[in-house]
């Protein structure tokens, strides 16, 4: 049982690290174009709006749903928490 859990955790962390690397690559090369075309204000406001858009579902899942007994709520909170970390 422990081996299965460790395998799942390793797979998740491997996918997580790959997505972080890919999103960093995209942001580095697209970030300058966003600033040049849309302006400084839009570039500066992108982070707070992204955080609000992703953080609200995460905290709603954690606060209002019983994530210990509901696998769906747990999955949603893990996915939204992962997106929150990746998009910050």
Image (cartoon, helix red, strand yellow):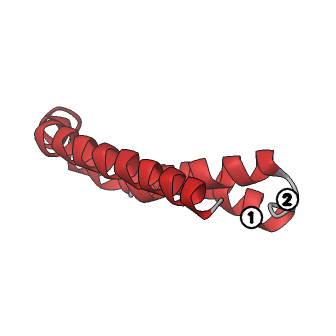
Other-residue count near label 1 (Cα within 10 Å), few / some / many at <14 / 14–19 / ≥20: some
Residue 37 placement (x, y as % from top left): 17, 32
Residue 84 located left or right of residue 23: right
**Quarter location, residue 63:** bottom right
Residue sitting at 17 percent across and 36 percent down? 30
Q: Position of residue 43 (x, y in %)?
A: 27, 48
In this view of the protein, can residue 52 be seen by the observer?
no
Q: Quadrant of the C terminus?
A: bottom left
Count neighbours of disc 2 (C-alpha within 10 A) and say few if under 14, some if 14 to 19, many if 20 or more. Answer: some
Q: Residue at x 65, y 57 (%)?
A: 58
Q: Are marks 2 and 1 in contact (CB under 8 Å)?
A: yes
- Quadrant where the N terminus is found in the figure: bottom right
Mark 2 element type = loop
Where is mark 1, residue-wise? 62
Q: Judge whether 48 appears above or below 14 on screen.
A: below
Residue 46 x, y percent position in the rendering:
37, 49
Residue 68 makes an appearance in the image:
yes
Side of 18 where 72 appears, left or right: right
Spatial distance from mark 2 to mark 1, Cα to Cα? 6 Å
Residue displayed at 17% across by 42% down: 25
The quarter of the displayed image where residue 81 is located: bottom right
Q: Which residue is mark 2?
A: 65
């Amino acid at each position: 049982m422990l081996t299965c859990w460790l395998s799942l955790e390793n797979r998740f962390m491997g996918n997580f690290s790959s997505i972080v690397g890919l999103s960093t690559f995209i942001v580095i090369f697209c970030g300058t174009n966003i600033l040049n075309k849309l302006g400084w204000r839009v570039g500066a406001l992108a982070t707070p709006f992204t955080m609000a858009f992703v953080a609200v579902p995460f905290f709603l899942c954690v606060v209002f749903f019983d994530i210990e007994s509901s696998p769906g709520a747990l999955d949603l909170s893990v996915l939204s928490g992962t997106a929150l970390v990746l998009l910050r």
